[in-house]
Amino acid sequence: MEKSMNQENQCDKSLCKMEIEEKRKNQIVDMGQVDLSANQYGYRIHLLNIIGEIEGHQCMGPMTKTTKYEHVLPELARVEEDSSIDGLLVLLNTVGGDVEAGLAIAEMIASLSVPVVTLLLGGGHSIGVPLSVSGDYSFIVPTATMVVHPIRMNGTVLGVKQNYEYIDKMQERILSFTCAHSDISNEDLKSVMFNTKELTKDVGSVLVGAEAVKIGLINEVGGIHDAFCCLYGLINQKKNSTI
């Protein structure tokens, strides 16, 4: 009888592990998010991917890779409320997208109490710029690019004073957030953003790897190992300060 109960308990544990693993796999497939804990410190790190186009209130086509803000915001709230999560690592490779949705995600990341490190891979264009600097420390790989340009409006826009004022206010929100979370000045960021000498059909600048670090937009050139080491250091620092 006792042997039978032990076998049942073992079966229950095996099923529980299988369910957890299945849930983890589905989480990666559906939203590109996973919790990591097999590190030397035993810290639980939440990994968040921000890829493709940032999707706002309108759905993109089925063939477009997107990051949906309605998926990301609840996950960030969970990261804040789950006391077992020690830090957040954000991997970015985005072409930009909806300004309001991108800023909402960036503000949520910036307001987290857990240490956050961002790593820019491939590209961090347009609204991807404030997202790239939203953590406590930012990295960019040597070949990644950042296209920094003013806000673009899709569709028909009435050429009236009120519309220009609205666009200008939105632009200021991006400028103020980016400058507040990086080492670049407002004047230097505007100079890069409104550059008319680099892009043939647009206004703005393309920054590759070390160029983004040189102007103070990103903290350091580095890869995944550097990002993890930095995050562990920030977590250790926080834990030591609360003892």
Image (cartoon, helix red, strand yellow):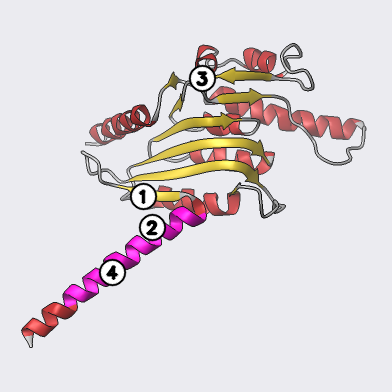
Residue denoted by label 2: 24
Q: Secondary structure at mark 3?
A: loop
- Mark number displayed over residue 209: 3
Q: Position of residue 81 (x, y in %)?
A: 40, 52
227 left or right, relative to 141? left
Whether residue 157 is situated above or below residue 17 in the rendered picture? above
As helix, strand or loop, the secondary structure at mark 2 comes to helix
* Residue under the point 28% across and 71% down: 15
Residue 35, labelled with which disc?
Answer: 1
Q: Is residue 162 above or below residue 82?
A: above
Q: CA distance from mark 4 to mark 3?
A: 44 Å
**Above or below — where is 106 with respect to 147?**
below
Q: Nearer the viewer, residue 76 or 34?
A: 34
- Amino acid at pointer 2: Arg
Amino acid, disc 4: Cys
Q: Residues within 10 Å of mark 2 (few under 14, many from 20)?
A: some
Which of the two discs, 2 and 1, sits closer to the camera?
2
Q: Is residue 202 magenta?
A: no
The disc, 2 or 1, on the residue closer to the chain's N-terminal end is 2
